[in-house]
Amino acid sequence: MRMENDEKKDEKPGRLARIGAAIADVAPTLAGALGGPLAGAAAETLSRAVLGDAAESPPRALEERLLARDPAALLAARAAETEFRKAVLEAQREAERIAAEDRASARERQVALKDRTPAILGFGVITGFFGVLGIMLAQELPAQAEPAFSIMLGALATMTAAVVNYYFGSSAGSREKTALLKGVR
C-alpha cells in the first residue's frame, strides 16, 4: 500500500507537460492532447507505443526515454501520433454519424406524424431572436436590462442555429473534418 502511495506522489502534473514538450516536434497532436481532456488516452497510446507491455512504472520510464531523446522512442512517438489522429478522426466520424441519424429520425417522425410542433417552435425561436435583436438595436436599454437582454439574445442565437441545422443541416462538421484530414496527411 505504501508503495502505491509513493508511486502516486511521483505522478506529478508536470510529468505530462515534460513528456509533451519532449515530443512536441515529432508528435504535436499527442503533445497537445497530454494537456487536455484526452490526456489519459494520449498517454496510454504513447506509453503503449514507446514501452510496449513494460508495466513497471510506465510514466517514469516513458519520461526518461523521451527526455533522453532516444531515437527509437521518438520514432515510436511519431507512429503513436498517427494512430492517435486516426482514433480521434474515427471518434469524430462516429459522433457525426450519430448526430445525423438523430436529426434524420426527428425529421422522419415529423413527417410520419404530420407534426407541426417543430415548425411552430422553430418559427417562434427565430421570431424571438430577431425581435430581441431589433429591440436591442432600436432602443437604448437601461443599463440594468442590458445583461439580461444579452443573455437572452445569446440563448436565442444558439436555438436559432439549432433550428437552422434541423431544417437545412450543418456544414460545420464537414469543415472540421476537412481541416483535420489536412493535418493528418
Image: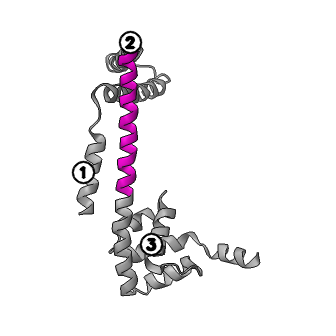
Q: Which of the 4 quarters of the picture holds residue 108?
A: top left
Residue 114 image point, x, y percent: 37, 12
Q: Name the residue under label 3.
A: 46
Q: Which of the 4 quarters of the picture holds residue 2?
A: bottom right
Tell me whether the residue at label 2 lies in contact with that at label 3, contact meaning CB atoms closer than 8 angstroms: no
Above or below residue 37? Residue 110 is above
Residue 35 image point, x, y percent: 47, 63
Q: Does the magenta stretch include residue 43?
A: no
Q: Name the residue under label 1.
A: 178
- Tell me the kind of residue under disc 1: Thr
Residue at disc 3, secondary structure: helix
Q: Looking at the image, which residue is at 35% across and 48% down?
A: 93
Residue sticking out furthest to the right: 1
Q: Mark 2 points at which residue?
A: 116
Quadrant location, the C terminus: bottom left
Would residue 178 be seen by someone viewing this image from the given angle? yes
- Tell me the kind of residue under disc 3: Leu
Dot 1 or dot 2: first in sequence order is 2
Mark 1, other Cα within 10 Å: few <14 / some 14–19 / many ≥20: few
Mark 2 to mark 3: distance in Å?
A: 52 Å
Q: What stretch is highlighted in magenta?
A: 88-115
Residue 62 image point, x, y percent: 49, 79
Report the predominant secondary structure element of the magenta stretch.
Answer: helix
Dot 2 or dot 3: first in sequence order is 3
Residue sticking out furthest to the front: 112
- Tell me the kind of residue under disc 2: Arg
